[in-house]
């Protein structure tokens, strides 16, 4: 018993002395509890909506007010053409487009059943279902409040249309996102572990006495993992297309180039973790600290529209948030570089920043 107590005391002393690991073990669960507790919400409201009101009459304005007062739709922009609605939904600036045709009020009062169109981004089935179900209820309630037409027969020819994923297949939404999720989990983990392992074995010191420069060491170690990441992306997308019939409506070259950009960010995270960590256990904790929130805060599972504003703001600093818009936009919407420039700019800034800081810190540690 005395020997067991001695071993227990020794292990506790080892844990307490390793301040970095101890702080990660204590701080990470508390932070995740706070973030996830506020962020996870399946009740989708405040869907970003773009309005194209060609009628501009008192009834059309009351209909728009009915949509806004429901708390399910937020009018974030006013279109001047049908093309502007398509661009806004394509680029993810709006989830819903409401089109009120000209002569809406005139035809409605004359009993001619005017068409009212709701265009819905179907790439994410959860907010799409919410938009589909609540919009019909809102229109029916509006007609009853205005006393127009019998309840049994709607006075408006209301046509919600689902774009990009008309059958609302969850595989179309989830599987492209798996590409980004696997890259952000696996690439930083294996990069950080490989470099820390070499430091533990003393291989880095052996490289330093050779004529190889520090930045050449970094580049030589990162390129193989770029190849691994691209292999993961190609394998998952090809399997998804064959097994689950997930379309690739955009240019594969565009997807390849932007996946490479996302890989650079993930490699930078792995390199940064290796410069901070003293052992592989610490490296794994640091990578998980960055990777874990990506599942719930990036929009991979839960719509970001449901998150409180502070959590929504924090999610913008997660690389996967922007890559999901890229991979889903290219595969499901057929988007190109011109449509995805905000995400390209953000990921480029992240890649340059994290790699520059990581290489600089790596050079200092080697020195």
Image: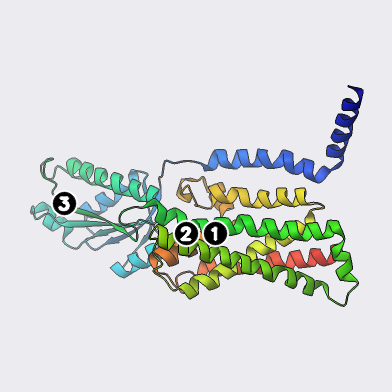
Q: Position of residue 249 (x, y in %)?
A: 39, 69
Q: Position of residue 45 (x, y in %)?
A: 40, 45
Locate residue 36 relative to residue 172 in the image: left or right.
right
Residue 180 in sight in this render: yes
Locate residue 173 relative to residue 288 in the image: left or right.
left
Q: CA distance from mark 1 to mark 2?
A: 8 Å
Residue 367 in sight in this render: no
Q: Position of residue 160 (x, y in %)?
A: 25, 54
Q: Which residue appears at 68% of the width and 69% of the height?
A: 224
Assess whether mark 2 and mark 1 are in contact (beta carbons under 8 angstroms): yes
Disc 2 is placed on an element classified as: helix
Numbered label attached to residue 176: 2
Disc 3 is placed on an element classified as: loop
Rendering quarter of residue 188: bottom right
Q: CA distance from mark 3 to mark 1?
A: 43 Å
Instruction: Name the one closer to the observer, 30 or 288.
Output: 288
Q: Quadrant of the C terminus?
A: bottom right
Q: Position of residue 296 (x, y in %)?
A: 54, 47
Q: Which residue is mark 1?
A: 180
Query: Which marked residue is nearer to the observer: mark 3 or mark 1?
Result: 1
Q: Quadrant of the N terminus?
A: top right
Rendering quarter of residue 262: bottom right
Instruction: Name the one closer to the observer, 100 or 211.
Output: 211
Q: Which residue appears at 69% of the width and 64% of the height?
A: 354
Instruction: Name the one closer to the observer, 110 or 163.
Output: 163
Q: CA distance from mark 2 to mark 3?
A: 37 Å
Assess whether mark 3 and mark 2 are in contact (beta carbons under 8 angstroms): no
Q: Which residue is mark 3?
A: 156
How packed mark 1 is, by other alpha carbons closer than 10 Å (few <14, some 14-19, many 20 or more), is many
């Amino acid at each position: 018993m005395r020997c067991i107590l001695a071993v227990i005391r020794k292990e506790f002393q080892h844990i307490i002395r390793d301040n970095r690991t101890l702080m990660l073990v204590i701080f990470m669960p508390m932070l995740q509890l706070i973030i996830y507790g506020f962020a996870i919400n399946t009740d989708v409201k405040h869907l970003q909506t773009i309005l194209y009101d060609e009628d501009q009459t008192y009834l059309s304005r009351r209909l728009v007010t009915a949509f806004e007062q429901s708390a399910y739709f937020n009018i974030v922009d006013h279109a001047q053409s049908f093309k502007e609605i398509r661009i806004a939904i394509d680029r993810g600036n709006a989830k819903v487009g409401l089109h009120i045709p000209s002569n809406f009020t005139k035809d409605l009062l004359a009993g001619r059943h005017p068409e009212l169109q709701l265009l819905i981004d179907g790439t994410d089935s959860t907010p799409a279902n919410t938009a589909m179900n609540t919009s019909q209820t809102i229109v029916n309630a509006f007609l009853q409040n205005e006393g127009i037409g019998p309840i049994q027969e709607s006075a408006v020819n209301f046509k919600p249309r689902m774009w990009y994923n008309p059958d609302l297949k969850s595989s179309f939404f989830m599987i492209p996102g798996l590409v980004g999720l696997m890259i952000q989990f696996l690439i930083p983990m294996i990069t950080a572990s490989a470099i820390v392992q070499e430091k533990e074995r003393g291989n880095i010191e052996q490289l330093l006495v050779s004529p190889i420069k520090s930045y050449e060491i970094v580049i030589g170690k990162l390129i193989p993992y770029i190849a691994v990441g691209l292999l993961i992306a190609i394998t998952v997308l090809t399997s998804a297309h064959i097994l689950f019939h997930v379309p690739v409506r955009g240019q594969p070259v565009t997807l390849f180039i932007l996946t490479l950009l996302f890989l650079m960010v993930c490699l930078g995270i792995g390199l940064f973790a290796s410069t901070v960590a003293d052992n592989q256990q610490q490296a794994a904790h640091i990578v998980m600290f960055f990777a874990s929130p990506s599942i719930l805060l990036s929009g991979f599972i839960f719509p970001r529209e449901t998150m409180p504003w502070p959590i929504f703001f924090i999610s913008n600093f997660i690389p996967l948030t922007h890559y999901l818009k890229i991979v889903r936009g290219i595969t499901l919407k057929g988007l190109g570089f011109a449509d995805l420039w905000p995400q390209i700019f953000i990921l480029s800034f992240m890649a340059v920043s994290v790699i520059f800081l990581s290489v600089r810190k790596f050079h200092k540690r080697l020195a």
